[in-house]
């Protein structure tokens, strides 16, 4: 699903090109009725619903201002990113439980773990971590696992035309590069798979070491033998 119907169809077409069955649906996660209809359609078209991946998010530039941020912008970011995820989980949970092997994987962010600015976006992403843990406890008895992936900077369409900014943040990553969509997809696929059958309520940080290693401090305080 995608709020942009044509974009959803392009993604579905790419999946079909790989020999996979795919349905394209336009859906705004801020609309509860639309979410419920999309989930029901997917479950009917596919025969069952085994995995839900929550990836919708809103990051309004105005919310970075804090004191001067429009309240509507703050509310929109939380409604899409946090409450939108709750809507999707609520609608999908009965279908996931019925499948006998249900899994929910939500896309969080390092913004939910440390200060990287963007107040509303960061607050919403932090909320997703809490929702993941509480929902994992709620859904465990029904055989549904719930986990979260927290990416760092990933080279997506959101960074188009911002090459200078990507170059600026790259040195902050101990592994020497920003992430690629495939890095996040691999983490999501793992948590959705039976290889992660005994993992629930956890956050998998996929950030090239950004939140684990203080590169600025290490650069300022070099020890003998360190390069």
Image (spheres, helix red, strand yellow):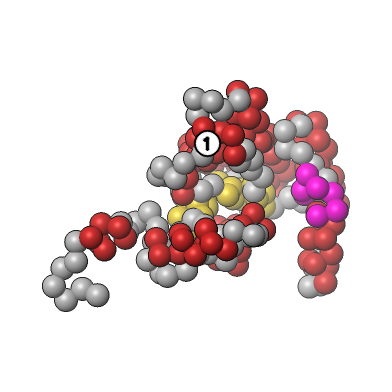
Residue located at (80% from left, 31% from top): 33
Whether residue 77 is in magenta: the answer is no
The one of 145 and 213 positioned closer to us in this rendering: 213
Left or right: 118 as drawn, with respect to 47: left
Which residue is denoted by mark 1 in the rendering?
Answer: 64
Q: Residue at x 51, y 48 (%)?
A: 109
Rendered location of residue 102, percent (x, y): 64, 50
Image quarter hosting the C terminus: bottom left
In this rendered view, identify the residue nearer to me: 140 or 10: 10
Q: Quadrant of residue 59?
A: top right
In the image, residue 221 sits, relative to residue 102, either above or below, namely below
Rendered location of residue 44, percent (x, y): 85, 47
Q: Quick one: SS at disc 1?
A: helix
Q: Which sits in the foreground, 199 or 100?
A: 199
Q: How many marks?
A: 1
Depth check: give the residue in front, 110 or 146: 110
Is residue 4 rendered magenta in the image? yes
In the picture, measured across the screen, residue 180 lies left or right of residue 212, that is right
Is residue 16 shown left or right of residue 84? Answer: right
| Residue 217 seen in the current view | yes
> Image height check: is 53 above or below 176?
above
Q: Position of residue 104 (x, y in %)?
A: 61, 48
Residue 66 position, x and y percent, is 50, 29
Rate crowding at label 1 as few (under 14), some (14 to 19) or many (20 or more) other CA atoms within 10 Å.
Answer: some
User: At 26% from the left edge and 63% from the top edge, which residue is drawn?
Assistant: 219
Position of 79 relative to 177 (above/below)? above
Please name the residue shown 78% across and 44% down the image: 3
* Furthest residue in direction left, as rendered: 224
Instruction: Tell me where the magenta segment starts and ends, as one range.
Output: 1-7
Give above or below for 145 relative to 192: above
């Amino acid at each position: 699903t995608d709020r942009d119907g044509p974009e959803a169809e392009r993604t579905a077409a790419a999946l079909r090109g790989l020999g996979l069955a795919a349905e394209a649906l336009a859906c705004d996660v801020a609309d509860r009725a639309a979410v419920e209809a999309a989930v029901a359609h997917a479950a009917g078209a596919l025969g069952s619903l085994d995995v839900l991946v929550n990836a919708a998010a809103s990051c309004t530039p105005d919310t970075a201002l804090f004191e001067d941020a429009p309240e509507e912008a703050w509310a929109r970011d939380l409604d899409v990113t946090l409450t939108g995820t709750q809507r999707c989980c609520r609608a999908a949970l009965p279908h996931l439980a019925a499948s006998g092997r249900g899994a929910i994987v939500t896309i969080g962010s390092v913004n939910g773990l440390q200060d990287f600015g963007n107040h509303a976006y960061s607050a919403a992403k932090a909320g997703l971590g809490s929702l993941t843990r509480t929902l994992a406890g709620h859904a465990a008895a029904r055989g549904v696992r719930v986990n979260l992936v927290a990416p760092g900077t990933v080279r997506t369409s959101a960074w188009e035309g911002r090459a200078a900014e990507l170059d600026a943040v790259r040195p902050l990553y101990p592994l020497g590069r920003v992430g690629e969509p495939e890095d996040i997809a691999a983490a999501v696929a793992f948590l959705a798979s039976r290889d992660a059958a005994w993992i629930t309520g956890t956050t998998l940080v996929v950030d090239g070491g950004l939140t684990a290693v203080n590169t600025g401090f290490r650069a300022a305080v070099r020890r003998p033998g360190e390069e």
